[in-house]
Image (cartoon, helix red, strand yellow):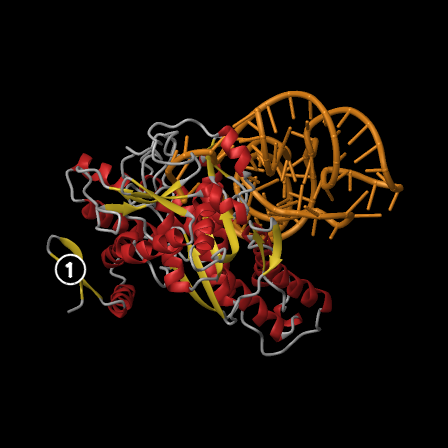
Amino acid sequence: MQQKLNLYNTLTRKKEAFEPLHAPFVGMYVCGPTVYGEPHLGHARSAVTYDVLYRYLKHLEYKVRFVRNITDVGHLENDADEGEDKIQKRAKLEHLEPMEVVQHYTNVYHQDMDKLNVLRPDIEPRASGHIIEQIEMIQEILQNGLAYEANGSVYFDVQAYNKDHNYGKLSGRVVEDLLANTRELEGQGEKRSSLDFALWKKASPTHIMRWPSPWGDGFPGWHLECSAMSRKYLGTTFDIHGGGLDLMFPHHECEIAQSQASNSHTDAARYWIHNNMITVNGQKMGKSLGNFINLSDLFSGNHELLEAKYSPMTIRFFILQAHYRSTLDFSNEALQAARKGYTKLMNGLRVLDKLQYPAEAAEPDAKLNEDLLKLTEDCFRGMNDDLNTARTIASLFNLLKKINSLYLGQLQIASLEKSTLETVQSTYRELVLDVLGLKEESTAHAEEMLDLVLNFYKEAKEAKAYDKVDAIRAELKKQGIVIKDLKTGIDWAYEE
RNA sequence: GGUAACGUGGCCGAGUGGCUAGGCUCAGCUCUGCAAAAGCUGCUACAGCGGUUCGAAUCCGCUCGUUACCUCCA
C-alpha cells in the first residue's frame, strides 16, 4: 500500500509527486480569514480542504508545521488610495476598537471551525503582530531596487520586477495584457503603474490602525503579511502554500513577487495549492453578490435559502464529497443527501466495532479477501490522487456494503483472513475519523431518553412489577442517576 | 475585451482512451407482527455536430450554453 501522494501544483499546472524539502518535516502555509465578518460556507471549504491535507500528511507520518494566518490589518476595501481598511470600517460601524472587531470575529471563526472538527494550526500569526518583519521585508525590496516610495507609501514596482522575473507565473497572467486591460481606478496617482501594489500605505490623519515606519506612520499592504510571516515561521522556501482560488491573483502572485524581490529570492513555497469556490445556483458565493451563507445560519437553519438546519458534520461531509478543485454547488437537496450519506458512514463505524473474528476459521474465500483488500487500497488511492476525497468516500461506501453484509451474515467473517478483517477495520476507522475528520454527532438527547425510561419505570410501578422497577433503578444508578419517587410524581437527580 | 475553466443519468458528484464510481431520490424484491436499518435489482448519463482511433464521457476542431479571475472575497 506504499503509494505516493500526488498534489496538483498551480505553479506547474500538473499533478506532482509530493516530496518534502526536508523529510520527514513538512512546512505548510495557508491563507486564513480576514476577521471582519462572520465565517461563511466558503471559509469552511478552505478550512476543511487544508485540514484534510494536514491530517493526511500527519497520517503519512510527516512532521507537519501548519501555519495559518489571521489577517487583522491592511486588507482594504479596494485598491484606490482612499480605500478603507475592512477592519476599521467595521469598527466604525459598530463603535468598537478595531482590535475588538478582530478579537470577536477571530473567536467566532475558531468556534465555527472547532464545530467543523477543523484542527487548529500549529502557529496562527496575526499581521498586526508582525509589523517589524514586514518593514524589514519592504526594506529588502527597496534595496533591491524593486519598490519605490511615494508620499509616505511604498509600492512594489511590477514592471521593474518583471524585467528579470516573471510576474504572472502562478496565475498565467502576462504583464503586457494586464497593462492593456486594467480598469481605470480612482486615486492611483502615486503609483507609477496600475499594476503596482502597496507594500506600505501612509495612514491618513483619521486612520486608526497605524504604526511608525521609516516612511512615516502607516500600515502594511495586504499581500505582505503572508510573505513575511511564512518566511519567519517556515523559512525562505517551504513545502506547501494553500488558499482559495480567488486569492491566486493578485494575492498569491504578489506573494511570490515579494519573496523573489526580497533577499529570499524564492517562490516561497514549492507546491501552490488552490481550492475552488462554493456556488449558489451556479454562481460564486461572494460578498459582493450578497448570496453567501454564514456558518451560523447553516447550523441554525435561519436563512431564506435554507429549508432546514444542517449540522457541522453534514457540512463537512458535503464539502468532502466533492474534489477540492471543483466548484461545489450549494442546494438544500445536496445538503440533505449529504446528511444521509454522513449518517450512513457513521452507522458503519458502529457496525465495524461489532465485527468479531470467530474462534474457528471457515473455508477461506480468496476472492472475498482480495476484494476487500482492493477496496481498502482504493480508499488510499483516492487520497493519494490529489486528495480526491470524493473517490475515497465512494470507496468507503463500497467497503461499507461488505461490512454490512458481514455483519448480517450474508458474507462470512470466518471466511476472511484475520488480517483482512483487521485491515478493513483500521482503514475504515482511520480514514473516516482521523483523515476525513468526521466524528459522531449524537442526535439523541439524554434528558429525553431519560424521560422515556422514567415512563417505563412508572408503568412498571403501577403494574407492581417490582423486579423491573428495581432493575431500572439499578441500571440508572450505574449511570450516576437516582430516581426520586415524590408524592407529586417521578423525578430524577444526579447521584451525590 | 484579455485569460482560464466547465457542461455527466431526477438531484449532487467522481472519472483523461477499453474495466459497475459513489451518495441522495424513485420503483421492485429479500428480511420483517408493522416498520426501520441492511442487502439485492432496476431507472431516459456523459451539451450538440464533426474528426482522430480497432475503440472516446475521456484526445482534436467547430457550435451552443454556463462560470471564474482581471476590483474586495475562502
Q: Residue at x 29, y 53 (%)?
A: A452
* Residue type at numbered disc 1: Asp
Q: Is residue A350 visible?
A: no
Q: Which residue is mark 1?
A: A485
User: Which of A155/A129 is in front?
Assistant: A155
Looking at the image, is A454 positioned above or below residue A104?
below
Looking at the image, is A475 positioned above or below residue B41?
below
**Quick check: A316 left or right of A211?**
right
Q: Quadrant of residue A120?
A: bottom left
Helix, strand or loop status at disc 1: strand
**Quick check: A89 left or right of A232?**
left
Looking at the image, is A166 positioned above or below residue A399?
above
User: Which of A487/B5 is in front?
Assistant: B5
Q: Residue at x 21, y 46 (%)?
A: A210
User: Which of A325/A159 is in front?
Assistant: A159
Q: Position of residue A225 (x, y in %)?
A: 35, 52
Q: Quadrant of the N terminus of chain A?
A: bottom right
Q: Quadrant of the C terminus of chain A?
A: bottom left
Query: To which chain does the residue with label 1 belong?
Result: A
Looking at the image, is A183 positioned above or below residue A383?
above
Q: How packed is label 1: few (under 14 Cα within 10 Å), some, or many (20 or more)?
A: few
Q: Position of residue A301 (x, y in %)?
A: 34, 38
| Tag count | 1
Q: Position of residue A261 (x, y in %)?
A: 45, 53
